[in-house]
Image: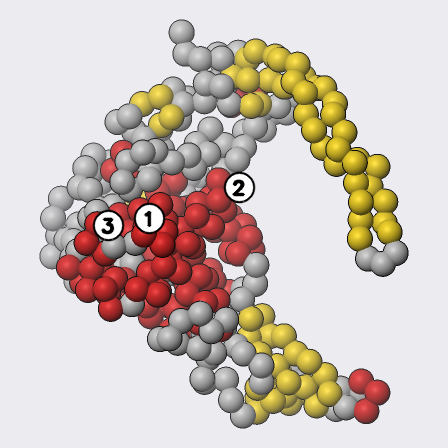
Amino acid sequence: VNMNLCGLCLLLSVEVCWLTVKVDASWWFMGSLGSRLVCDHVPGLVNRQRQMCRQFPGVMKVIGAGVSDWIQECQHQFRTNRWNCNTTNDHNLFGRLLLRGSREVAFLYSISSAGVVHSVARACSQGSLDSCSCDPGKKGRSRDDRGVFDWGGCSDHVDHAVKFSQMFVDERERRQRDARAAMNLHNNRAGRKAVRRFLSLQCKCHGVSGSCTLRTCWLALSDFRRTGDHLMRKYRRAVHLSINQDSSAGSPTGQRRGQELRRPSKHDLVYLEESPDYCVRDTESGSLGTAGRVCNRTSRGVEGCDVMCCGRGYDTARVRLRSKCECKFHWCCSVLCQDCDHEEDMHFCKGHT
């Protein structure tokens, strides 16, 4: 499916359930290269991305280190789902899953784009990069609901990080002429907006006896977990793209199951294809299956054995676990614990027969 792009609104008007155009994010592979990053050896980068890689080696190392952080966040968010953000040995980390325009892929693109912004902005304010520092726009005086304050400290330079992400992360998708590329661009932007959403104003009071007659404030990034939680909520309410057949103009709309057609917002995640059930290993769909996954025998949720194991049943094993116990606070200031062993039953999904 090739389209003459006339802007995102037109691009988001197409539902393609059989799309097989590969628009991957091979820069994710940089996370496994680490300090050995060599721009010419990162598979799948387009020319502009390689140029930026050579021009900003420090930023590339920051991004490479950040890849592991957002993958860990992805795995945390999906830890109780059938698909749990497991990676493969494929250069794009997630194998053939990326060939599908599913809501899981929508989450992957959004969380990775958010991870780049978070990593670069934090590195700027920490003085780790020569190309940026604290946000230079946060100077002089401003006002919030508590009154006037002076800008001070070191505000995280999110604007710079967002612009870099747009130039680097979006470059491959901007070269494509299909609905899948438009989906990826939309979800990349939603991820960047999620990071901005949780910028917080932090202040320090000055004055006699802490009277707070003067405040010095700066903008700081929140913990990345808040961004991950937000994008997970968007994942659950992701919009399935479709065409409004009743409109003579063919205006773009999305559809949530059981709801009326509506236009997706810039903050929504969007997808083109329904997800597989992820019950069994299927390299074509990117499913690793749930055989051997730990499940909760008493839960009726997605982590419960009935749902997680897809009706195949489960095995129970007695396992020995070690945890901290008998912790005591010692003045001042430490907490000392002992390591205690205990046994408990754990349940594992049976394989497909």
Q: What is the CA distance from the residue labelled 1 to the residue labelled 2?
A: 23 Å
Q: Which residue is disc 2 drawn over? A: 76
In the rendered image, residue 312, in percent from the top left (x then y), is placed at 48, 12
Q: Are marks 1 and 3 in contact (CB under 8 Å)?
A: yes
Q: Which residue is disc 1 drawn over? A: 33
Q: Which residue is disc 3 drawn over? A: 42
20 or 334, which is in the foreground?
334
Q: What is the CA distance from the residue labelled 2 to the residue labelled 3?
A: 27 Å
In the rendered image, residue 25, in percent from the top left (x then y), is placed at 28, 49
180 or 63, which is in the foreground?
63
Q: Residues within 10 Å of mark 1 (few under 14, many from 20)?
A: some
The amino acid type of the residue labelled 1 equals Leu
Q: Earlier in the sequence, mark 1 or mark 2?
A: 1
Q: Residues within 10 Å of mark 3 (few under 14, many from 20)?
A: some
Q: Earlier in the sequence, mark 2 or mark 3?
A: 3
36 or 50, which is in the foreground?
36
In the rendered image, residue 246, in percent from the top left (x then y), is placed at 25, 49
